Amino acid sequence: MDKAAGTPGPKKDVLQPVDDEARRLAKTLLRTERHGALATLEPGTGWPAASRVAVATMMSSEPIFLISRLSAHFGALEADPRAGLMLGSPGAGDPLAHPRLMVQGRAEMLAGDARATARRRFLARHPKAQLYVDFADFAFWRLSIDKASLNGGFAKAYAPTPADLLVEVADAFQAMEAGAVEHMNDDHLDAVKLYAEVLLHRPAGAWRLTGLDPEGLDMARGDDHVRLWLDPPLPTPDALRPRLVALVKQARAAQEA
């Protein structure tokens, strides 16, 4: 407040510059969170309404979710596709001290090849959804990322752009992912185990690969989901196998050190 003039002064900009650390945090939330709060606009009234949904991502990092036509948010998205999705799980202590990401965009119901891809990636993240995934009243939706807000904790607010979060994925990567994931889980679970337990220092267990993209590998052990980032990202699908071999060598060297 400007006491002399009696009018408010300029609003303080609380946003921090989006750096590599902030981008990695936002992308990690996108790739590893399994549930989020979906906000839609209630038909007829325009009132905001929120509901919890199970989420996964396409290779591009766009969120996907599976919802029933019987739910209120299904009809809301049909009437107005604008939506927001909040991701982030509070831990011990003050829940506001833990990071969360909100993305806003337009939801699109998926069909054809896009639905098949969403189905495969979603079930890899939520295998229990196999019980109802093909019920006639259920459909997959993809949320575009048009705007985002990242809060990394107190005094850590950022406004990532879509370019900070999205990944350009060539058709060749799309074509090879399912086969590569299946091959690793069928023949190389020992390598997946090394990635999770040695490189990411996660507890021992039955780790499996749930997805991959040019920037990283997604792995799960029950409800524990982690991501191993590939630095630098893969330039082509042909670079995947030698990178995976190199990661195994790195993990074994770490074990012997």
Image (cartoon, grey):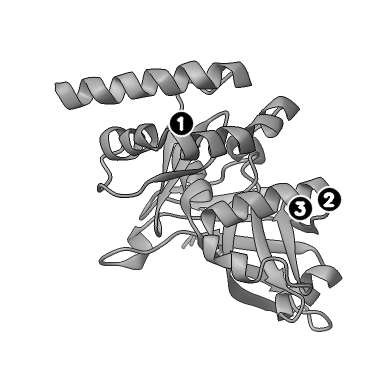
Res 201 seen here: yes
The residue positioned farthest toward the left in the image shown: 257
Instruction: Please rate how many residues cluster around mark 1, counting C-alpha atoms within 10 Å: few if below 14, some from 14 to 19, many from 20.
Output: few
Answer left or right for 132 relative to 113.
left
Question: Circle 1 — which element?
Answer: helix
Q: Which mark is residue 143?
A: none
Where residue 71 appears, x then y in whole percent?
71, 80
Instruction: Provide the residue designation for mark 1.
Output: 20
Nearer the camera: disc 2 or disc 1: 2
Q: Are marks 2 and 3 in contact (CB under 8 Å)?
A: yes
**Residue displayed at 73% across by 72% down:** 135
- Of labels 2 and 1, earlier in sequence is 1
Query: Tag on residue 112?
Result: 2
Foreground residue among 82 and 29: 29
The residue shown at (79%, 55%) is 110
* Left or right: 67 as drawn, with respect to 51: right
The amino acid at mark 1 is Asp
